C-alpha cells in the first residue's frame, strides 16, 4: 500500500502508540494536530495543523492518504452537546473528507460504551459516531471498520494508571456492583489491532480485549496489582452507588458554575456500575488474525515496576 496513514487524535496516548508502531514499521504517517505538537520528529511523520471542523485541514490530511484512522475522542463533558462535536460530528467530517479525497480505508476507534448508549451522554455520542460513519460509508467508495475497545491502559494513561498506583499503595476503591466484570486492554495491543485492520478488508464493528476470558472483577484486578507490586492484600473500600451519584451530581453542578469539563458525572457513574463490560476476540481474530500479546500482569509490571514490556504470545479467548 502506498501513501501515508492519516491519523486524528495523534496527541493522545492511543494515537501516540499507533503512530509509534506505524513508524517502527517504516510506514509514512500524517497526523492532525490541534492544540499541541507531538514532540516527535521522524522523516516519515508529517503534521497538519487544524481541527475536526476545519475542512481545509482535513483535505490536506487526507490528500494522497491510503487510509485514515479516526482516534480523536471527547471523554469529558457535562451533557450530550459537549460530546457530539468530536465523537459524532467529527466522525462525519472525517468520513466526508475521506470520501472527497478518495481515501480507500477508514477505521473508527469507538468505545465499548457504545454498546450501551442509554447509560451516559458519552456512550450515546460514541454510538452516534458509529452511525454517522455507517451513513457516510454507503456508496462512499471506501471500506470501513469500527473498533470498540474496553478500558485501555498504558504508560501515558491518565485515568487507569493512577488507579492502579493507588491500589499498589494499599487502597483499593471498589465502585462497581457485586458480580460486575470488565475487560481490559494494553494500548500497544490496541495499536496492533488497528494496524491489522488497516491491512485487511474486514468491515464490521469489533470488540476486543486482552484475552482474559470473562474479564475481571474489581477484586481480581486489585489482586493482580498487589502481586505485581509485591505487597499484601490492601484495604478494600466499597463505594456505594448513592455516594458516587451524590459526588458526581455535585461535580456536574460545580463544572457548570466554574466552566470546566468534568470526568465524574452521573453518566460516568452509570458506566462504572454497569455489570457487564466483557469482550470477546473471536470475530476480530477470525477476520484479521490479531491476538493480544500483553497480559495484565506483564502490562502492570512494566508500568508499576519499570520492567521491560513482555509479550505473551498465544493469549486467546477465541471460541
Image (tube, helix red, strand yellow):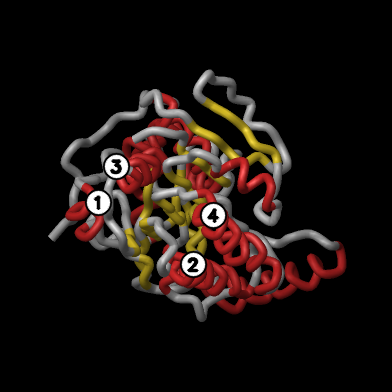
Instruction: Please say if the residues under marks 1 and 4 sit with CB atoms less than 8 Å apart.
Output: no
Give the CA distance from mark 2 to mark 1: 33 Å
Look at the image and tell me whether residue 177 can be seen.
yes
Percent coordinates x, y for residue 143 in the rendering? 36, 57
> Which residue of the protein is positioned furthest toward the left in this rendering?
319
Q: What crowding class fits label 3: few (fewer than 14 Cα within 10 Å), some (14-19), or many (20 or more)?
A: many
Above-or-below relation of 281 to 194: below
Question: Mark 3 touching mark 1, by CB under 8 A?
Answer: yes
Q: Quadrant of residue 100?
A: bottom right
First in sequence, mark 3 or 1: give its number.
1
Q: Residues within 10 Å of mark 1 (few under 14, many from 20)?
A: many
Percent position of residue 268, x then y = 58, 68
Between 73 and 152, the one nearer to me in the picture? 73
| Image spot of residue 82 (x, y percent) | 70, 67
Question: Whole-percent x and y of residue 142?
Answer: 40, 56
Nearer to us of marks 2 and 1 is 2
* Side of 152 where 308 appears, left or right: left
Q: Nearer the viewer, mark 2 or mark 3?
A: 2
Residue sitting at 52 percent across and 77 percent down? 119
Q: Which residue is mark 4?
A: 100
Binning the other alpha carbons within 10 Å of mark 2 as few (below 14), some (14 to 19) or many (20 upward) gives some
* Secondary structure found at label 4: helix
The relative height of residue 197 versus residue 300 in the rendered view (above or below) is below
Residue position for label 3: 295
Q: Which mark is residue 136?
A: 2
Amino acid at each position: 500500500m502506498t501513501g501515508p496513514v492519516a491519523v486524528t487524535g495523534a496527541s493522545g496516548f492511543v494515537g501516540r502508540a499507533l503512530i509509534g508502531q506505524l513508524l517502527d514499521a517504516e510506514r509514512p504517517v500524517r497526523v492532525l494536530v490541534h492544540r499541541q505538537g507531538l514532540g516527535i520528529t521522524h522523516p516519515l511523520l508529517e503534521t497538519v495543523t487544524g481541527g475536526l471542523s476545519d475542512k481545509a485541514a482535513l483535505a490536506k490530511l487526507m490528500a494522497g492518504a491510503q487510509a485514515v484512522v479516526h482516534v480523536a475522542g471527547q471523554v469529558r463533558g457535562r451533557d450530550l452537546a459537549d460530546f457530539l462535536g468530536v465523537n459524532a460530528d467529527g466522525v462525519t467530517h472525517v468520513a466526508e473528507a475521506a470520501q472527497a479525497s478518495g481515501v480507500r480505508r477508514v477505521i473508527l476507534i469507538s468505545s465499548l460504551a457504545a454498546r450501551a448508549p442509554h447509560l451516559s451522554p458519552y456512550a450515546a455520542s460514541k454510538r452516534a459516531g458509529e452511525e454517522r460513519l455507517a451513513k457516510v460509508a454507503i456508496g462512499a467508495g471506501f471500506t470501513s471498520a469500527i473498533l470498540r475497545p474496553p478500558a485501555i491502559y498504558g504508560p501515558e494513561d491518565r485515568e487507569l494508571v493512577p488507579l492502579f498506583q493507588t491500589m499498589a499503595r494499599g487502597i483499593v476503591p471498589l465502585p462497581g456492583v457485586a458480580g460486575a466484570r470488565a475487560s481490559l486492554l494494553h494500548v500497544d495491543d490496541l495499536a496492533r489491532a488497528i494496524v491489522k485492520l488497516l491491512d485487511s478488508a474486514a468491515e464490521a464493528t469489533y470488540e476486543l480485549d486482552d484475552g482474559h476470558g470473562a474479564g475481571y472483577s474489581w477484586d481480581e484486578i486489585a489482586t493482580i496489582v498487589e502481586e505485581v507490586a509485591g505487597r499484601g492484600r490492601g484495604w478494600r473500600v466499597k463505594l456505594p452507588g448513592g455516594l458516587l451519584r451524590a459526588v458526581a451530581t455535585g461535580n456536574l453542578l460545580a463544572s457548570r458554575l466554574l466552566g470546566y469539563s468534568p470526568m465524574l458525572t452521573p453518566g460516568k457513574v452509570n458506566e462504572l456500575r454497569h455489570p457487564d463490560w466483557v469482550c470477546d476476540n473471536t470475530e476480530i481474530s477470525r477476520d484479521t488474525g490479531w491476538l493480544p500479546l500483553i497480559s495484565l500482569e506483564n502490562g502492570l509490571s512494566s508500568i508499576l515496576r519499570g520492567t521491560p514490556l513482555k509479550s505473551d504470545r498465544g493469549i486467546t479467548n477465541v471460541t
